[in-house]
Image: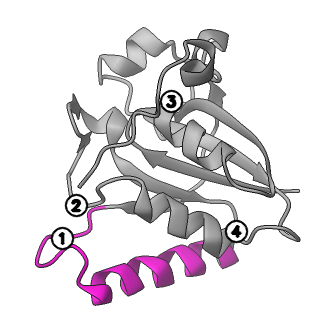
Amino acid sequence: MTIATFGAGCFWGVEYFFKQINGVVAAQCGYMGGNDKFQTYEQVKAGTTGHAEVVKVEFDDNVVSYEELLTVFWQNHNPTTLNMQGGDIGSQYRSTIFFHSKEQKLLAEQSKLSLIQSGKWGLRQIVTEIVPVQTFHPAEEYHQNYLEKNDLPSCHISY
């Protein structure tokens, strides 16, 4: 199994759309990118810890490729809004790819460049960070599978 970690706004929706992919064996909500101390949701939500809401995706790369996960990442959030997605505002909702290997870094950079060259977002700048993986802090249990547990539709934002 291979691990990928993405931040694309509220982790409930990010977890949901990655779990729909054949070959993804697990998706876990959590926090990454801030100080290494354990943080609670309330601390991260306050925007003072430097963490992003992320989803750690465990996948079988014989079934789904990292490139395919990157495509899903780009399709399911707005990578041009700095530190926000929809009504969620703050650095904890930033668009970020935490790479786990040199290959993931290269593939993430190539996919970002392809998105820019596609013109999909016009003249708007793609602000997505591509940074090395850091300590992953799992979110509290009530955040895991939140949309399913509460029978809510995906919180996917339309653009």
Residue at point 35%, 61% (across, down): 128
Q: Identity of the amino acid at label 1?
A: Gln
Specify the quadrant of the image occupied by residue 52: top left
Q: Nearer the viewer, residue 150 or 10?
A: 150
Residue highlighted by disc 1:
125
Q: CA distance from mark 4 to mark 1?
A: 25 Å
As drawn, 93 above or below 105: above
Decide: marks 1, 3 in contact (CB < 8 A)? no
The percent coordinates of residue 26 (x first, y second) are: 77, 40
Residue highlighted by disc 3:
12
What span is colored magenta in the figure? 103-127
Q: CA distance from mark 1 to mark 3?
A: 25 Å
Q: Nearer the viewer, residue 36 or 62?
A: 62
Q: Identity of the amino acid at label 3?
A: Trp
As drawn, 16 above or below 112: above
The circle on residue 80 is: 2
Q: Earlier in the sequence, mark 1 or mark 3?
A: 3
Q: Earlier in the sequence, mark 1 or mark 2?
A: 2
Q: Identity of the amino acid at label 4?
A: Ser
* Secondary element at image label 2: loop
Residue at point 29%, 82% (across, down): 116
Q: Earlier in the sequence, mark 2 or mark 4?
A: 2
